[in-house]
Image (spheres, rainbow, N blue to C red):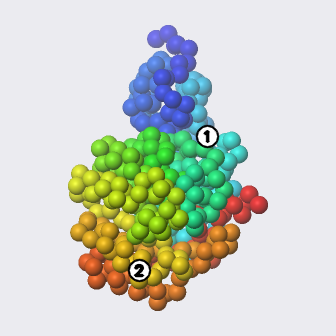
């Protein structure tokens, strides 16, 4: 067959990154460039399952074909700029992007979960964040840009590759979209990354093992309920009244609590899934009044509350609440019949709060 000139596909820029492409898209791209469709499946496996960082590593694909494909498809590895290991096994990574930006990614509780073969990775979806939550180091730095789907899957892939050097069978089992950025402000790339990570030929991470965490972008919650209700939802609630939430999570001024809870109920009805409501507790918010307000808001809902005593961030002056206050807060919710847990401390000996490592590195 006469070989045609390399053709770009009609995808957007981000879809031309190999790490953000679905298997069938790679197959079509191969066909459009005069190659057999199965080459696309081979490329997908190398990229998504073996987590390769270069075309040269794809040893079962002829050099001429690799050259042709590299003209229409980019394979851009993330650069590991820094790794921090906490005493509790949490590992935090700072990855550099092609344009000089950097993002954070966290492997939670690696050592302890190793025995159970359960590995949860928290990935970023934006460089910086436009939401500006009061207690968040990421928000302090402002917003730079959205990540592409390839840069989102890339975090899981780089981390997997890195870990496999010491633990050959390492496999990420759960992904939370809870790192830097608001996932629903980058909806298309996040949903694409989820589909790619879910592929059985790649990382094979179950839809129900991936969770999007939002600061309360109501249209995003409604859209997720329609598009893919298999994916878990976590909502950063943080307060039980609009007055307090307006200050902690500025997104609340756009989508106040009544609207947010309405969308959450809709998601719950369609998905049948329990929503996790995250409540970050500071020295100022860990009190009886706030606990009662949260309990009133969630009563009767299919919900679980995760209390998070905040990691202190020097720049914000926010302090961690006393343990006794956290226990009292949990007690009020439990009494109201709302399942509640307190997130265990993780990575307090490293820069565990979202955005801290990137800020230090920048300085
Ligand atoms: S907590 Fe999340 S949504 Fe809020 S500023 Fe930080 S990264 Fe953005």
Where in the figure is residue 15, as x and y percent of width and height?
A: 50, 33
Q: Residue furthest top?
A: 2
In-front residue for pair 87/140: 140
The circle on residue 289 is 2
In three-dimensional space, the C-alpha distance between marks 2 and 1, rounded to whole angstroms, equals 50 Å
Q: Which residue is mark 1?
A: 76
Residue 325 vs residue 295: left or right? right
Where in the figure is residue 316, as x and y percent of width and height?
A: 65, 69
Q: Give the SS element for disc 1.
A: loop
Q: Residue furthest right?
A: 363
In-front residue for pair 39/71: 71
Residue 320 in sight: yes
Quadrant where the C terminus sits is: bottom right
Q: Residue at x 60, y 44 (%)?
A: 145
Q: Is mark 1 within 8 Å of ligand 1?
A: no
Which mark is nearer the camera, 2 or 1?
2
Q: Earlier in the sequence, mark 2 or mark 1?
A: 1
The circle on residue 122 is none
Residue 23 vs residue 226: left or right? right
Q: Residue at x 42, y 25 (%)?
A: 28
- Tell me if mark 2 has few (under 14), some (14-19) or many (20+) residues whose alpha carbon lies within 10 angstroms of its own: some
Q: Residue at x 28, y 83 (%)?
A: 335
Where in the figure is residue 202, as x and y percent of width and height?
A: 42, 45
Where in the figure is residue 319, as x and y percent of width and height?
A: 60, 78
């Amino acid at each position: 067959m006469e070989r045609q000139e390399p053709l770009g596909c009609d995808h957007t820029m981000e879809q031309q990154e190999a790490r953000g492409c679905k298997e069938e898209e790679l197959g079509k791209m191969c066909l459009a460039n005069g190659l057999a469709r199965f080459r696309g499946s081979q490329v997908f496996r190398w990229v998504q399952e073996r987590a390769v960082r270069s075309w040269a590593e794809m040893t079962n694909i002829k050099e001429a074909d690799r050259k042709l494909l590299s003209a229409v498809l980019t394979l851009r590895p993330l650069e590991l700029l820094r790794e921090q290991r906490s005493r509790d096994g949490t590992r935090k990574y700072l990855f550099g992007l092609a344009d000089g930006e950097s993002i954070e990614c966290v492997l939670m509780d690696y050592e302890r979960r190793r025995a159970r073969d359960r590995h949860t990775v928290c990935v970023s979806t934006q460089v910086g964040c436009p939401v500006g939550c009061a207690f968040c180091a990421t928000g302090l730095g402002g917003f730079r840009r959205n990540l592409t789907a390839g840069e989102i899957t890339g975090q899981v892939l780089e981390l997997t590759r890195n870990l496999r050097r010491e633990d050959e069978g390492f496999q990420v089992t759960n992904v939370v979209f809870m790192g830097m950025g608001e996932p629903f402000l980058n909806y298309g790339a996040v949903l694409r990354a989820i589909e790619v990570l879910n592929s059985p030929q790649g990382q094979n991470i179950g839809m129900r093992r991936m969770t999007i965490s939002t600061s309360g972008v109501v249209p995003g919650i409604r859209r997720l309920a329609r598009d893919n209700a298999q994916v878990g939802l976590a909502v950063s609630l943080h307060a039980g009244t609009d007055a307090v939430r307006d200050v902690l999570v500025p997104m609340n001024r756009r989508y106040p609590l009544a609207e947010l809870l309405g969308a959450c109920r809709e998601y719950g009805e369609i998905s049948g899934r329990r929503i996790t409501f995250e409540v970050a507790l500071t020295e100022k918010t860990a009190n009886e009044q706030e606990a009662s307000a949260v309990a009133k808001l969630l009563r009767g809902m299919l919900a679980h509350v995760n209390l998070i005593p905040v990691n202190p961030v020097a720049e914000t002056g926010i302090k961690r609440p006393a343990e006794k206050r956290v226990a009292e807060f949990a007690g009020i919710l439990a009494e109201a019949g709302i399942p509640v847990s307190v997130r265990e401390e993780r990575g307090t000996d490293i820069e565990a709060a979202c955005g801290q490592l990137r800020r230090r590195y920048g300085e």
